[in-house]
Image: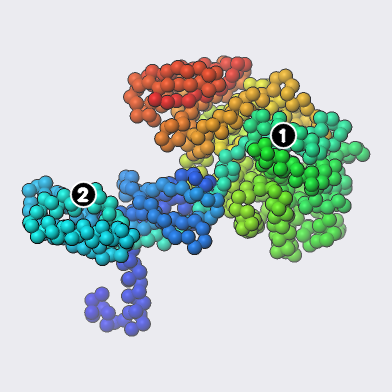
């Protein structure tokens, strides 16, 4: 600031101006446009342990000096920062890829600096190549090495090596060996050494420590099998038990599932109990909806007595683990009118002016067997703690996965707080949001902590719909925080496509869900192609929600082999573990979806051709992605048909394939050079 201008300011104002000036001057190199950064760092990006995290940013400075940048990252309380060099991509965009090894919270930030050593090499080479004397440049180069030797950066060994380098340069300067100095100053070993010890001029730092939540792999890659425990006895006249579920484990494992999701297992209320097919009047032997939670036996921390005891449940958890599966349970924050909380904590519920309790409603629907809690007024904070403690109660019982019923109807701040509280006890806890609602609400739930989310996949059937939706999920910002779980059906959703497409339709939806998604799930009966609907509705007739059913789990016409095939494929091929590795390619038929899953090094490369027509044979020409292997349009690739076992070769970019839905409505190929 000119002297005349400085004299105008008071001493206090001048000091404030100097502080502001120095604060701005400290960050000469611009770092902006950082990704992934969710809502300015308000929420964490998600990865699972060992999964690649690619961080990018726009990084540039004034003038023509060379710059350099590094990614700083750490995980764990009090951990030291680790550094990964960032590389120039294009148009002032820089990037680096790392991976976090452990489940839990992590952070990253970015530093950048003017790299005077790189600038010196660039300018000295241009002058030397032009035949200009570089004696002064060599002196400047030695000064840069001397400054690096005194910088204090790097290990003791690095600093000693830099000092030895400077001494050697001084020797060469003493003998007048310009070529020797230049070769030593520009040698690859010198460049590498200066990265460790060189002065980082105008070192600038991104102001935020960007949060990352690192999950265990099961949060990002899982195959769910959903069932009603009470329907596992094999006899509709006998209520199933946990022991019956244990007996079914080998059957479920044979299909390759790794998460066994149990519909609510708590006591069921009797007041306003629903009868078969959602009848308002229940018969004496009707079991009621398990979502009407709570009776004189207890509430959310109790087990329905006909299922068994806590000891029985513990045996189920252990048996599932022995079969390579985890137990997931339903966390449904709703109560029967008989729930003990209603008498113990009336302030947690809504009451009508006539003194009666308010039932759950979704006008014109009314759920007379269910009442909802509220989260504010006299219920805050006690209901928050009570619900947190319910989840922690089941964590102590060995449950680490929770499917949460209708979370979008509960406050977002509650979920953010509760999930964080549970993660203090078990950072590997997994929460699946069953929220078929507006897109921004679904995304907010993912931001506040949900590991997985139900999605619109259930209603995406056409080629355009699927490609558009999957492109959004895998390529837009939500790919960094929202992991969909592609359920093909649920007890509440009997999709029209499955009602009308027969066995080929079930195989089509299975192929899509299991290969497009990192997480997917089926509700039991799907393997039997169960579809009988309530006329005109996306609901099951004779629904298990209101009665006990029995099935022949291996009856003729099942698609168990298809399910086992895709689950084996998912576990055998590394490409299947990355949801965002999905790419759509050209197949000249709107009834056929054609896409790839692949690893970055192309060592695991899968192509999928899936007919979307369950009635008619479909085929056409398609493009083989030779370019992804660095091959010309007339190149060739080895092809293994994983469904049939055939091995052959594709020569050239355009090939043809035909699918008959009565035979197999999908094809899966492994490509290699």
Q: Is residue 384 above or below residue 17?
A: above
Q: Is residue 125 visible?
A: yes
Distance of label 1 from label 2 (alpha carbons): 63 Å
Q: Count residues near mark 1 (Cα–Cα under 10 Å), then give few for <14, some for 14-19, many for 20+.
A: some
Where residue 608 appears, as percent x and y from the top left, is 51, 26
**Residue at image mark 1:** 249
Quarter of the view holding residue 341: bottom right
Q: Residue at x 76, y 48 (%)?
A: 361
> Circle 2: is it few (<14), some (14-19), or many (20+) Cα within 10 Å?
few
**In the foreground, 105 or 474:** 105
In terms of sequence position, does the residue under pointer 1 or pointer 2 come before the other? 2
83 shown above or below 644: below
Q: Is residue 138 left or right of residue 554?
A: left
Q: Quadrant of the C terminus?
A: top left
Q: Is residue 581 above or below residue 506?
A: below
User: Is residue 538 in sight in this rendering?
Assistant: no
Residue at coordinates 84% horizontally, 31% vertically from top-left? 236
At x 48%, y 50%, the residue is: 100
Compare residues 2 and 395 and report the one nearer the observer. Answer: 395
Q: State the residue position of label 2.
A: 187
> 330 or 33, which lies in front?
330
Residue 200 image-quadrant placement: bottom left
Image height check: is 279 above or below 10?
above
Quarter of the rendering occupied by the N terminus: bottom left
In screen coordinates, is 357 left or right of 563?
right
Point out the residue furthest to the right here.
284
Q: Helix, strand or loop at disc 1? A: helix
Question: Quick check: 418 left or right of 71?
Answer: right
**Disc number placed over residue 284 in the picture, else none:** none
SS at circle 2: loop
Colour approach in the figure: rainbow
Residue 98 x %, y %? 43, 48
């Amino acid at each position: 600031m000119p002297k005349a201008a400085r004299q105008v300011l008071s001493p206090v104002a001048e000091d404030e101006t100097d502080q502001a000036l120095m604060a701005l001057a400290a960050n000469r190199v611009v770092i902006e446009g950082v990704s992934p950064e969710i809502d300015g760092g308000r929420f964490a990006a998600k990865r699972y342990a060992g999964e690649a995290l690619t961080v990018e940013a726009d990084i540039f400075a004034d003038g023509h000096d060379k710059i350099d940048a590094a990614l700083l990252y750490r995980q764990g309380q009090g951990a030291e920062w680790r550094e990964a060099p960032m590389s120039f991509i294009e148009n002032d965009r820089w990037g680096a890829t790392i991976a976090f090894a452990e489940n839990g919270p992590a952070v990253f930030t970015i530093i950048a600096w003017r790299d005077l050593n790189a600038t010196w090499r660039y300018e000295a080479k241009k002058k030397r190549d032009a035949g200009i004397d570089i004696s002064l440049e060599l002196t400047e180069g030695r000064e840069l090495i001397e400054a690096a030797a005194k910088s204090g950066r790097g290990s003791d060994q690095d600093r000693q090596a830099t000092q030895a380098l400077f001494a050697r340069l001084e020797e060469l300067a003493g003998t007048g060996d310009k070529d020797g100095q230049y070769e030593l100053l520009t040698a690859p070993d010198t460049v590498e050494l200066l990265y460790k010890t060189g002065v980082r001029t105008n070192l600038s730092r991104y102001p935020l420590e960007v949060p990352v939540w690192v999950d265990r792999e099961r949060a990002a890659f899982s195959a769910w099998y959903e069932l009603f425990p009470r329907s596992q006895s094999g006899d509709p006249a006998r209520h199933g038990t946990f022991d019956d579920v244990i007996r079914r484990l080998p059957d479920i494992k044979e299909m390759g599932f790794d998460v066994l999701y149990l519909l609510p297992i708590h006591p069921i209320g009797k007041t306003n109990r629903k009868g078969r097919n959602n009848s308002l009047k229940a018969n004496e032997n009707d079991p009621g909806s398990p979502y009407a939670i709570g009776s004189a036996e207890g509430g959310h921390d109790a087990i329905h007595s006909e299922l068994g005891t806590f000891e029985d449940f513990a045996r189920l958890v252990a048996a599932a683990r022995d079969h390579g599966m985890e137990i997931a349970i339903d966390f449904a924050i709703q109560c029967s009118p008989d729930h003990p909380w209603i008498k113990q904590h009336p302030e947690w519920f809504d009451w009508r002016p006539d003194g009666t309790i308010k039932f759950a409603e979704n006008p014109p629907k009314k759920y007379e067997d269910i009442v909802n809690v509220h989260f504010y007024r006299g219920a805050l904070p006690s209901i928050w703690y009570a619900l947190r403690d319910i989840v922690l109660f089941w964590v102590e019982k060995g449950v680490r996965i929770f499917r949460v019923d209708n979370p979008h109807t509960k406050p977002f701040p509650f979920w953010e707080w509760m999930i964080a509280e549970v993660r203090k006890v078990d950072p590997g806890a997994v929460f699946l949001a069953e929220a078929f609602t507006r897109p921004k609400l679904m995304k907010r739930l993912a931001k506040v902590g949900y590991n997985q989310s139900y999605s619109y996949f259930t209603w995406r059937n056409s080629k355009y719909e699927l490609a558009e939706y999957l492109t959004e999920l895998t390529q837009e910002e939500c790919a960094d925080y929202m992991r969909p779980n592609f359920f093909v059906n649920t007890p509440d959703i009997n999709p029209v496509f499955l009602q009308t497409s027969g066995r080929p339709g079930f195989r089509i939806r299975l192929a899509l869900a299991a290969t497009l998604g990192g997480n997917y799930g089926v509700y039991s009966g799907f393997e039997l192609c169960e579809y009988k609907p309530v006329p005109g509705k996306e609901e099951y007739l004779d629904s298990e929600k209101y009665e006990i059913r029995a099935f022949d789990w291996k009856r003729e016409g099942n698609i168990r082999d298809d399910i086992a095939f895709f689950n084996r494929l998912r576990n055998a091929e590394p490409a299947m573990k990355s949801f965002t590795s999905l790419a759509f390619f050209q197949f000249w038929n709107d009834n056929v979806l054609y896409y790839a899953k692949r690893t970055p090094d192309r060592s695991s490369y899968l192509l999928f051709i899936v007919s979307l027509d369950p009635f008619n044979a479909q085929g056409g020409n398609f493009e083989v992605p030779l370019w992804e292997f660095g091959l010309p349009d007339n190149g060739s690739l080895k092809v293994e048909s994983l469904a049939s076992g055939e091995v052959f070769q594709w020569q050239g970019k355009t090939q043809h394939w035909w699918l008959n839905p009565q035979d197999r409505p999908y094809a899966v190929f492994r490509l290699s050079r």
